[in-house]
Image (cartoon, rainbow, N blue to C red):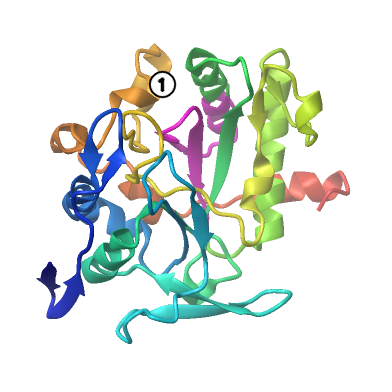
Amino acid sequence: MQIEINGRLIKLSNLDKVFWPDEGYTKHDLIKFYIDISPFLLPFLQDRPCNFQRFPDGIKGKSFYQKNTPSFAPEWIKTFPIPSEERVINYILADNLETLVYVINLACLEIHPWHSRAKAIKHPDYGIVDLDPQEGVDFDTVLEVARAVKLVLDNLELTGFPKTSGATGLQIYVPLKTRYSYEQVRDIIGFISELVREKAPALTTMERMVAKRGAKVYLDHLQNLWGKTINAPYTVRPVKGACVSTPLTWEEVLNGRIKPADFNIKNIMARLKNTGDLFAPVLTERQSAAPILRKLKAKGKS
Protein backbone atom coordinates (compact mmCIF):
# COMPACT_ATOMS: atom_id res chain seq x y z
CA MET A 1 0.00 0.00 0.00
CA GLN A 2 1.17 3.54 -0.76
CA ILE A 3 0.13 6.82 0.81
CA GLU A 4 0.80 10.29 -0.62
CA ILE A 5 1.69 13.05 1.83
CA ASN A 6 2.73 16.50 0.62
CA GLY A 7 3.56 15.10 -2.79
CA ARG A 8 5.73 12.26 -1.41
CA LEU A 9 4.76 8.64 -1.99
CA ILE A 10 5.42 6.44 1.04
CA LYS A 11 5.11 2.68 0.87
CA LEU A 12 3.41 1.17 3.92
CA SER A 13 4.01 -2.48 4.78
CA ASN A 14 2.71 -5.18 7.14
CA LEU A 15 -0.15 -3.02 8.36
CA ASP A 16 -1.93 -6.01 9.92
CA LYS A 17 1.06 -7.05 12.03
CA VAL A 18 0.12 -7.02 15.71
CA PHE A 19 2.41 -4.76 17.75
CA TRP A 20 0.58 -4.93 21.11
CA PRO A 21 -0.55 -8.57 21.47
CA ASP A 22 -2.60 -8.10 24.64
CA GLU A 23 -4.69 -5.32 23.09
CA GLY A 24 -4.52 -6.46 19.46
CA TYR A 25 -3.21 -3.08 18.31
CA THR A 26 -1.55 -3.31 14.92
CA LYS A 27 1.01 -1.41 12.90
CA HIS A 28 -1.94 0.29 11.19
CA ASP A 29 -3.09 1.53 14.62
CA LEU A 30 0.43 2.81 15.30
CA ILE A 31 0.68 4.75 12.03
CA LYS A 32 -2.82 6.17 12.42
CA PHE A 33 -1.96 7.33 15.95
CA TYR A 34 1.15 9.16 14.78
CA ILE A 35 -0.71 10.81 11.91
CA ASP A 36 -3.45 11.96 14.30
CA ILE A 37 -0.99 13.21 16.94
CA SER A 38 1.39 14.84 14.44
CA PRO A 39 0.07 18.45 14.88
CA PHE A 40 1.07 18.20 18.55
CA LEU A 41 4.22 16.11 18.14
CA LEU A 42 5.98 17.65 15.14
CA PRO A 43 6.77 21.01 16.81
CA PHE A 44 8.85 19.08 19.36
CA LEU A 45 10.78 17.30 16.61
CA GLN A 46 11.31 20.32 14.36
CA ASP A 47 14.99 20.83 13.49
CA ARG A 48 16.11 18.30 16.12
CA PRO A 49 18.25 15.24 15.34
CA CYS A 50 16.36 12.14 16.43
CA ASN A 51 17.11 8.68 17.74
CA PHE A 52 14.49 6.01 17.07
CA GLN A 53 13.78 2.71 18.76
CA ARG A 54 12.48 0.14 16.29
CA PHE A 55 10.31 -2.89 17.13
CA PRO A 56 9.91 -4.85 13.86
CA ASP A 57 7.98 -7.65 15.59
CA GLY A 58 6.05 -5.60 18.09
CA ILE A 59 6.71 -4.74 21.72
CA LYS A 60 7.40 -8.33 22.74
CA GLY A 61 9.96 -8.87 19.99
CA LYS A 62 13.55 -7.72 19.73
CA SER A 63 14.21 -4.00 19.37
CA PHE A 64 17.14 -1.83 18.36
CA TYR A 65 18.06 1.84 18.21
CA GLN A 66 18.42 3.65 14.91
CA LYS A 67 20.64 6.74 14.92
CA ASN A 68 22.20 6.82 11.48
CA THR A 69 19.89 7.35 8.51
CA PRO A 70 19.37 4.03 6.67
CA SER A 71 21.18 3.76 3.33
CA PHE A 72 17.86 2.96 1.65
CA ALA A 73 16.10 6.11 2.91
CA PRO A 74 14.62 8.29 0.14
CA GLU A 75 16.61 11.33 -0.95
CA TRP A 76 13.99 13.75 0.35
CA ILE A 77 14.60 12.74 3.97
CA LYS A 78 16.38 15.67 5.64
CA THR A 79 19.39 14.74 7.76
CA PHE A 80 21.94 16.42 10.02
CA PRO A 81 25.51 15.15 10.50
CA ILE A 82 27.04 14.96 13.98
CA PRO A 83 30.56 13.57 14.45
CA SER A 84 31.00 10.84 17.06
CA GLU A 85 34.22 9.28 18.30
CA GLU A 86 34.18 6.67 15.54
CA ARG A 87 32.23 8.19 12.65
CA VAL A 88 29.85 10.87 11.50
CA ILE A 89 26.23 10.00 12.27
CA ASN A 90 23.63 11.39 9.89
CA TYR A 91 20.57 11.87 12.07
CA ILE A 92 17.09 12.15 10.60
CA LEU A 93 15.25 15.44 11.13
CA ALA A 94 11.58 14.49 11.41
CA ASP A 95 10.40 17.95 10.45
CA ASN A 96 7.26 17.01 8.55
CA LEU A 97 4.46 14.45 8.38
CA GLU A 98 5.89 12.53 5.42
CA THR A 99 9.17 11.92 7.26
CA LEU A 100 7.32 10.97 10.43
CA VAL A 101 5.17 8.41 8.61
CA TYR A 102 8.23 7.04 6.81
CA VAL A 103 10.09 6.32 10.06
CA ILE A 104 7.00 4.95 11.82
CA ASN A 105 6.54 2.52 8.93
CA LEU A 106 10.02 1.24 9.84
CA ALA A 107 8.42 0.18 13.15
CA CYS A 108 9.86 3.11 15.09
CA LEU A 109 7.67 3.23 18.18
CA GLU A 110 9.80 5.61 20.18
CA ILE A 111 11.19 8.97 19.04
CA HIS A 112 13.96 10.60 21.05
CA PRO A 113 14.85 14.12 19.88
CA TRP A 114 17.97 15.96 20.97
CA HIS A 115 17.59 18.76 23.53
CA SER A 116 19.04 21.21 21.00
CA ARG A 117 18.15 22.19 17.46
CA ALA A 118 20.43 21.70 14.46
CA LYS A 119 20.91 25.46 14.06
CA ALA A 120 22.30 25.68 17.61
CA ILE A 121 23.31 22.09 18.20
CA LYS A 122 25.66 22.81 21.12
CA HIS A 123 23.06 24.78 23.08
CA PRO A 124 19.97 23.02 24.49
CA ASP A 125 16.81 25.08 24.77
CA TYR A 126 15.54 23.15 27.77
CA GLY A 127 16.80 21.05 30.64
CA ILE A 128 14.96 18.01 31.99
CA VAL A 129 14.48 16.90 35.58
CA ASP A 130 14.09 13.16 34.98
CA LEU A 131 12.33 11.28 37.78
CA ASP A 132 13.24 7.62 37.35
CA PRO A 133 11.60 5.33 39.94
CA GLN A 134 13.73 2.36 40.91
CA GLU A 135 12.32 -1.09 41.52
CA GLY A 136 9.67 -1.10 44.21
CA VAL A 137 8.73 2.57 43.84
CA ASP A 138 5.14 3.38 42.83
CA PHE A 139 3.90 6.33 40.79
CA ASP A 140 2.38 8.03 43.83
CA THR A 141 5.92 8.44 45.14
CA VAL A 142 7.02 9.84 41.79
CA LEU A 143 4.24 12.43 42.03
CA GLU A 144 5.31 13.31 45.56
CA VAL A 145 8.85 13.96 44.31
CA ALA A 146 7.45 16.00 41.40
CA ARG A 147 5.71 18.21 43.93
CA ALA A 148 9.08 18.78 45.61
CA VAL A 149 10.51 19.75 42.21
CA LYS A 150 7.70 22.29 41.84
CA LEU A 151 8.58 23.88 45.20
CA VAL A 152 12.26 24.11 44.25
CA LEU A 153 11.47 25.65 40.86
CA ASP A 154 9.10 28.15 42.45
CA ASN A 155 11.80 29.19 44.92
CA LEU A 156 14.23 29.66 42.03
CA GLU A 157 11.59 31.59 40.07
CA LEU A 158 11.69 29.05 37.26
CA THR A 159 8.78 27.42 35.46
CA GLY A 160 8.69 23.70 34.74
CA PHE A 161 6.34 21.61 32.63
CA PRO A 162 5.63 18.00 33.71
CA LYS A 163 4.84 15.02 31.52
CA THR A 164 4.51 11.32 32.11
CA SER A 165 7.28 9.26 30.57
CA GLY A 166 4.57 6.90 29.35
CA ALA A 167 6.13 4.10 31.38
CA THR A 168 6.86 4.42 35.11
CA GLY A 169 8.47 7.84 35.48
CA LEU A 170 7.88 11.51 34.98
CA GLN A 171 9.91 14.31 33.41
CA ILE A 172 9.80 18.02 34.10
CA TYR A 173 11.04 20.26 31.29
CA VAL A 174 12.62 23.59 32.20
CA PRO A 175 12.81 25.92 29.15
CA LEU A 176 16.09 27.84 28.98
CA LYS A 177 17.69 30.59 26.96
CA THR A 178 19.64 29.09 24.07
CA ARG A 179 23.00 30.19 25.39
CA TYR A 180 24.09 27.43 27.75
CA SER A 181 26.29 24.47 26.90
CA TYR A 182 25.22 20.89 27.55
CA GLU A 183 27.62 20.78 30.50
CA GLN A 184 26.09 23.93 31.96
CA VAL A 185 22.56 22.55 31.56
CA ARG A 186 23.66 19.35 33.27
CA ASP A 187 24.98 21.46 36.16
CA ILE A 188 21.82 23.60 36.27
CA ILE A 189 19.57 20.55 36.48
CA GLY A 190 22.03 18.93 38.90
CA PHE A 191 21.72 21.98 41.18
CA ILE A 192 17.92 21.74 41.05
CA SER A 193 18.09 18.00 41.71
CA GLU A 194 20.33 18.49 44.75
CA LEU A 195 17.76 20.86 46.24
CA VAL A 196 15.02 18.33 45.56
CA ARG A 197 17.09 15.62 47.24
CA GLU A 198 17.50 17.85 50.28
CA LYS A 199 13.72 18.35 50.45
CA ALA A 200 12.92 14.65 50.04
CA PRO A 201 15.98 12.63 51.16
CA ALA A 202 13.93 9.55 52.05
CA LEU A 203 12.39 9.40 48.58
CA THR A 204 15.18 10.45 46.21
CA THR A 205 18.73 9.60 45.25
CA MET A 206 21.41 10.89 42.89
CA GLU A 207 23.55 7.76 43.29
CA ARG A 208 24.96 6.74 39.90
CA MET A 209 25.46 3.08 40.80
CA VAL A 210 22.14 1.28 40.33
CA ALA A 211 22.88 -1.25 43.07
CA LYS A 212 23.24 1.54 45.63
CA ARG A 213 20.10 3.53 44.80
CA GLY A 214 17.62 1.47 46.76
CA ALA A 215 13.85 1.88 46.44
CA LYS A 216 13.95 5.57 45.64
CA VAL A 217 13.32 7.95 42.75
CA TYR A 218 16.56 8.53 40.87
CA LEU A 219 17.09 12.18 39.92
CA ASP A 220 18.88 11.62 36.63
CA HIS A 221 20.42 15.00 35.78
CA LEU A 222 22.96 13.28 33.52
CA GLN A 223 20.22 12.87 30.91
CA ASN A 224 21.06 16.47 30.00
CA LEU A 225 24.52 15.70 28.62
CA TRP A 226 25.55 15.88 24.96
CA GLY A 227 23.98 13.08 22.94
CA LYS A 228 21.52 12.01 25.65
CA THR A 229 17.89 11.92 24.58
CA ILE A 230 14.47 11.32 26.13
CA ASN A 231 11.27 10.23 24.42
CA ALA A 232 9.36 13.21 23.09
CA PRO A 233 6.00 14.32 24.47
CA TYR A 234 3.08 12.67 22.65
CA THR A 235 5.09 9.56 21.72
CA VAL A 236 3.94 6.02 22.42
CA ARG A 237 5.89 3.59 24.61
CA PRO A 238 6.48 -0.14 24.11
CA VAL A 239 4.45 -1.05 27.20
CA LYS A 240 1.15 -2.76 27.90
CA GLY A 241 -1.77 -0.55 26.94
CA ALA A 242 0.22 1.48 24.38
CA CYS A 243 0.67 4.34 26.85
CA VAL A 244 1.54 7.79 25.55
CA SER A 245 3.98 10.25 27.12
CA THR A 246 1.51 12.93 28.13
CA PRO A 247 1.92 16.53 29.37
CA LEU A 248 0.20 17.20 32.67
CA THR A 249 -1.06 20.25 34.49
CA TRP A 250 0.53 21.00 37.84
CA GLU A 251 -2.95 20.67 39.32
CA GLU A 252 -3.02 17.03 38.17
CA VAL A 253 0.40 16.45 39.71
CA LEU A 254 -0.61 18.10 42.97
CA ASN A 255 -3.89 16.24 43.38
CA GLY A 256 -2.18 12.94 42.54
CA ARG A 257 -5.13 11.27 40.85
CA ILE A 258 -3.42 10.29 37.60
CA LYS A 259 -1.43 7.29 36.38
CA PRO A 260 0.70 6.85 33.24
CA ALA A 261 -1.71 4.14 32.08
CA ASP A 262 -4.51 6.73 31.93
CA PHE A 263 -3.23 7.99 28.57
CA ASN A 264 -2.92 5.76 25.51
CA ILE A 265 -3.12 5.79 21.72
CA LYS A 266 -6.89 5.28 21.81
CA ASN A 267 -7.88 8.10 24.18
CA ILE A 268 -5.15 10.74 23.96
CA MET A 269 -6.82 12.73 21.19
CA ALA A 270 -9.98 13.16 23.28
CA ARG A 271 -7.85 14.54 26.11
CA LEU A 272 -6.05 16.96 23.81
CA LYS A 273 -9.36 18.35 22.57
CA ASN A 274 -9.98 19.44 26.15
CA THR A 275 -6.49 20.48 27.28
CA GLY A 276 -4.83 21.65 24.08
CA ASP A 277 -1.04 21.51 23.98
CA LEU A 278 0.03 21.95 27.60
CA PHE A 279 3.67 21.73 26.49
CA ALA A 280 3.56 24.54 23.91
CA PRO A 281 5.30 27.03 26.27
CA VAL A 282 8.34 24.73 26.40
CA LEU A 283 9.08 25.83 22.84
CA THR A 284 8.57 29.55 23.41
CA GLU A 285 9.58 30.42 26.98
CA ARG A 286 13.27 31.20 27.44
CA GLN A 287 14.38 31.41 31.06
CA SER A 288 17.68 32.58 32.45
CA ALA A 289 19.66 30.28 34.73
CA ALA A 290 22.32 32.89 35.46
CA PRO A 291 21.61 32.98 39.23
CA ILE A 292 22.15 29.21 39.46
CA LEU A 293 25.40 29.39 37.50
CA ARG A 294 26.65 32.19 39.74
CA LYS A 295 25.94 30.05 42.81
CA LEU A 296 27.73 27.09 41.25
CA LYS A 297 30.71 29.26 40.35
CA ALA A 298 30.90 30.57 43.90
CA LYS A 299 31.02 26.97 45.11
CA GLY A 300 33.68 26.11 42.53
CA LYS A 301 31.37 23.67 40.74
CA SER A 302 31.09 25.44 37.42
Image: 166 above or below 117:
above
What residue do we see at 40% from left, 49% from top? 282
Q: Is residue 10 left or right of residue 238?
A: left
Residue 216 in which image quadrant: top right
Q: Residues within 10 Å of mark 1 (few under 14, many from 20)?
A: many
Q: Is residue 114 visible?
A: no
What residue do we see at 14% from left, 33% from top? 270
Q: Nearer the viewer, residue 181 or 136?
A: 136
Image: 42 above or below 26:
below
What residue do we see at 53% from left, 21% from top? 142
Q: Nearer the viewer, residue 173 or 37?
A: 37
Which portion, as a residue range, is magenta?
A: 149-177
Dot 1 lies on which element?
Answer: helix
The mark total stands at: 1
Image: 279 above or below 75:
above
* Residue placed under numbered mark 1 in the picture: 253
Q: Give, as a three-letter code, the residue at label 1.
A: Val
Return the x and y of residue 7 as percentages of the image width and height.
12, 80
Inspect the magenta stretch and tell me whether residue 68 lies in it: no
Q: Is residue 74 left or right of residue 137?
A: left
Quadrant in the picture for the N terminus? bottom left
Q: Nearer the viewer, residue 5 or 115?
A: 5
Return the x and y of residue 263 as percentages of the image width and height.
29, 29
Inspect the magenta stretch and tell me whether residue 169 lies in it: yes
